[in-house]
Amino acid sequence: MPKDHPHAPHDDIVYPAAIPFVLVHVACFGAIWTGAPKQALWVALALYFVRMWAITAGYHRYFSHRSYKTSRLFQFCLALLGQSSAQRGVIWWAAVHRHHHLHSDTPEDVHSPRHHGFWYSHVLWIFNPKYGKRDYSAVRDLTRFRELVILDRNPYAPAALLAFPLLLWGGWSMMVVGFCWSTVLLFHCTFFINSLVHEHGSQRYLTGDDSRNNFLLALITRGEGWHNNHRHYQSSTRQGFRWWEIDVSFYVLSAMSWFRLVWDLREPTEAIVRGERPVGRKVLEKVAAELAGTFSVEAICAHLPTVPELREKAEQMFEAGAPRSTRSWRVPTRSWLRRSQPT
């Protein structure tokens, strides 16, 4: 693998941007000394669900896909709440996700189980320093907002602003259990969409990648488990297309739309849900390339006769009893073909 390849081996496994991610995992073991009081557990559960909604409805459906509209003030609130999850800056997150969609399940994908294995797609890609800084050319719609740029440059400040008051309020047990436990749980349930939902579940639509629908993960991630639906129609705010496909993030956004906090929520048409929309050229080319890659050209050619063998077979056929009118036919030689070219 070339050294400049995005997934090339590297020696600097732990670099500065990955240190907070490691530390919050280590801090979870502090519960051995602090205990896990019931109040801290309830806070952890509440923080998980609130911040998971901020990731799904904010980071993903709004900032990455712009599937609905909101005010500049509420946009900032979504970014601030999302960054309290310690999943890096809002612009960085959107840039990584848009790159992922552009190259989904190809060797250039940031996190593809097909090409890089389950654990790399789930978590190890985070430790690759090549992803510490992203190309922001694909997120210029976000970089024009100064407040979002400031947040993105201080990726862990909102998480610290959440953790410190918890420490003052409930002590170290609240910090460890309420904040750290919920943050780590949020990390990995979010990452399951990159890893597990590309390996386990059902595929309703042809999307050119390994995306699947997974009911259990849809419940855990507030609707993100309907991943194959999302890949089929990426601009939809609603990802649970059928009535029984629970999508809590969309329900909350719908309620907010009654108060004009958000508006212009996009939903798939009946034709899209039924899969009647023509498949895009990019998807067809990707599927065709993958299908062609399953055939071995060398194996096929090994069973084909050569041109001299074909000429010999033809000569034998005509000499053995081919009709008189065709006996003068010969397999064309290269020199004959050259003479027959129009001038």
Image (spheres, rainbow, N blue to C red):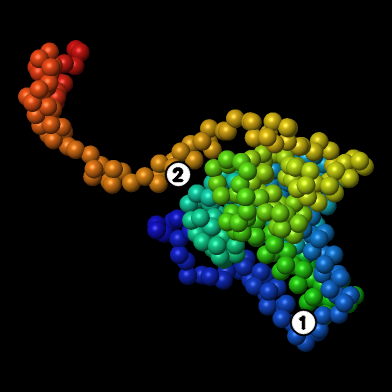
List x then y, in percent, for residue 230.
67, 44
Is tag 2's residue or tag 1's residue first in the polypeptide sequence? 1
Q: Secondary structure at mark 2?
A: helix
**Three-letter code for the amino acid on which mark 1 is drawn:** Ala
Please give the residue where the numbered disc 2 appears in the rendered image: 290
Which mark is drawn over residue 188? none
Asked if residue 208 shows in the view, the reply is yes
Q: Position of residue 228 (x, y in %)?
A: 64, 46
Q: Residue reaching furthest right?
A: 259
Q: Looking at the rendering, in which quadrant would you find the C terminus?
A: top left
Quarter where residue 2 is shown: bottom left
* Left or right, 294 with reference to 267: left
Residue 149 in the image: above or below residue 129: above
Residue ID for mark 1: 31
Query: Dividing the image into 4 quarters, which one contains the N terminus?
Result: bottom left
- Report whether 256 appears left or right of 234: right
Which residue is depicted at the point 80% across and 38% down?
265
Q: Residue at x 73, y 42 (%)?
A: 241
Is residue 342 found left or right of 257 in the rendered image? left
Q: Residue at x 51, y 61 (%)?
A: 117
Seen at 85% across and 43% down, the residue is 254
Residue found at the very far left of the displayed protein: 319
